[in-house]
Image: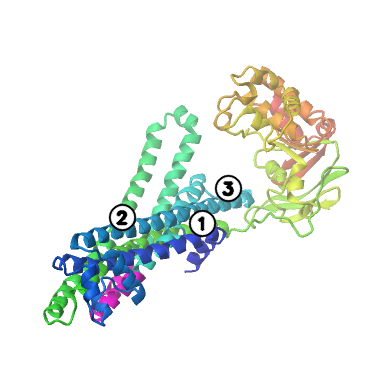
Amino acid sequence: MKDYFRLLAHLKPHLRYLIPAMIFMVLFAAMSGFSITMIVPFTKILFSQPGEISQQAFEKEEKPDQEKESLVVLLPETLKRKFNQVIVGKTYLETLGRFCILVFLIFLVKNLFWYAQSFLIVRVEHGVIMDLRNKLYSHFHLLPLEYFHGQRTGVLISRITNDITLVKGAVANGFAQALRQGFLVLVYLFLVFWASWKLAFIALLLFPFAILIIGKFGQKVKKSSVITQEKMGAMTSVLQETISGIRVVKAFVMERFEVKKFTDTTKDYYKTMVKLTRIGSLAPPLTEILGVFAAVLLLWFTGREILTGTLDPGRFFLFLFAMLSLMQPIRTISHLNIDIQQGLAAGKRIFEVLDTQPKIKNYPDAIKKESLEKAVTFEEVSFSYDGNKEVLSDISFEVNAGEVVALVGPSGAGKSTLMDLLPRFYDPTRGEIKVDGIDLKKIDLNSLRNLMGIVTQETILFNDTVWNNVAYGYEQASEDRVYDAARAANAHDFIRAMPQEYQTVIGDRGVKLSGGEKQRLAIARALFKNPPILIFDEATSSLDSESEALVQEAIDRLMKGRTVFVIAHRLSTIQNVDKIVVLNHGRIVQIGDHESLMKEGGLYKRLYQMQFKL
């Protein structure tokens, strides 16, 4: 129930639609009940002799018992007399005609109430789903990189698509249906008891059995729903991985392998869905069978009551119609329990994500920093992903503002991990990193990351226009600023040669661009941001000579006047940097410039000689 109340809390922002919707639900239920009571005057009119029900007949009638002479029930005496005056005509046919018009008007008003509550409740339903999706998506952006490294992308996508769609059954649609059908049940129950409390008591004796059966099915559905959504997440994950890696799939001729992997996941999903549907589909028919069983007993009992004269036929018909009408909302509620259990299972998975607290967050009274004035300092920094094995140990060095420092070392030395600490993708397990003497943890996270531009070896571009990729996140970017960034990155010419120039959509991850064009576009994005600190993962090794020259020229412009951290793979590109930090097994083994490190010997010299085969 705790999860359900958490889900219902998302209705609060939509009370301005929910409250009037509930009012219209009550009015709809009342009109539904009132429409059933029309069976009483209908039977009186239908089974009366011509002339028996007419205005003259009522005027001559001197019986004090108004209940017997009135055509309607459940109305105050004044309204009953008004009703008779309006409905009863001079002739039998006139009375029948007026009654038919009244019935039409009652059903017209009832359905207007239905339309009004349906229109309002749809706004509530989709508003809740929109809020949950936005909340979950926003929370994804608060979670650290560490969280995403431990999750499959398809599973996370499934949380925000399939799971939230299922939540609609519990929170929005389920809650609305529970109210709507609940009001109808109350109205019909009132009519049932008013018509004959003895018959109602017999009918209600079977209710506990129905509730017990519904509860049992609900628990089974909830359990099966959890498995179903896990299978859906696995299927989505395989789909996402295959589409994003389709080039590798085709290159290795693994289409058949990937198709088999996907069909295996769809088969698992198929089996769990069949099981879930089989369980869920049993509830409504079983509920209806119980209802029919109750109806058979009641028909037998009422037959005796009518024959003995203790039950008025009009009330019996009212009871019968109210009971039959009662079956539909009860049946809907029994099926609704299935939707709610599925939604609760999905809600639990959503809350698992929302309850994951970001480890990287702003500290109280965080300082906003807009520039680097002195230096970036690493003081005895150590880091571990799992809290046990350290991948960085006692890292200490300083980079003055405007200097270019290169990080070199064999694969797995900890270069990328060390640079992930600077924008606080992770926090050190020991030691401190300072900007102008201020611990990174005391700097506002957004302002810290605004100080930095990151150009990675794996170029990440978005399926959007060239303009929006360069001016990423800036809706009102000036034309001069975008063009200047593109020119400085040696990208302006190839952009102008594209079909729609800067408004050309470049495809998923920039699939329509070459490797060199992607890199230059990424550099243009960094230049547009104009950050004082640059973290650069050198990425020219896979380019052809012409592209490499253009990219390297753009890199040189990008690095000018900035404090730069370069993760160097090609040592030929870092011979003129101010400082080289050599890492091995997570520790600094050498620091110096190119000439001093070559004279010193050691790991740097060996790496250099291996690259140039000296």
The dot on residue 149 is: 3
Q: Position of residue 399 (x, y in %)?
A: 83, 41
Residue at 40% x, 54% y: name it: 115
Label whose residue precedes the other's in the sequence (1 or 3): 3
Q: Give the quadrant of residue 442.
A: bottom right
Is residue 500 inside the magenta stretch? no
Mark 1, mark 3: which one is toward the viewer? 1
Viewer-proximal residue, 74 or 181? 74
434 on left or right of 361: right
Give the image location of residue 512, x and y in percent. Answer: 56, 25
Q: Let me know if residue 539 appears in the view.
A: no
The mark total stands at: 3
**On the rendered structure, is 158 left or right of 369?**
left
Magenta segment, which residues? Answer: 186-214
Q: Nearer the viewer, residue 539 or 121?
A: 121
Amino acid at dot 1: Ile
How far apart, in angstroms, are the residues tagged by discs 2 and 3? 34 Å
Q: Residue at x 59, y 19 (%)?
A: 499
- Magenta segment main secondary structure: helix
Q: Earlier in the sequence, mark 2 or mark 3?
A: 3
- Residue 277, label in figure: 2
- Residue toward you, 61 or 480: 61
> Residue placed farthest to the right in the image?
374
Checking the image for residue 350, the label placed there is: 1
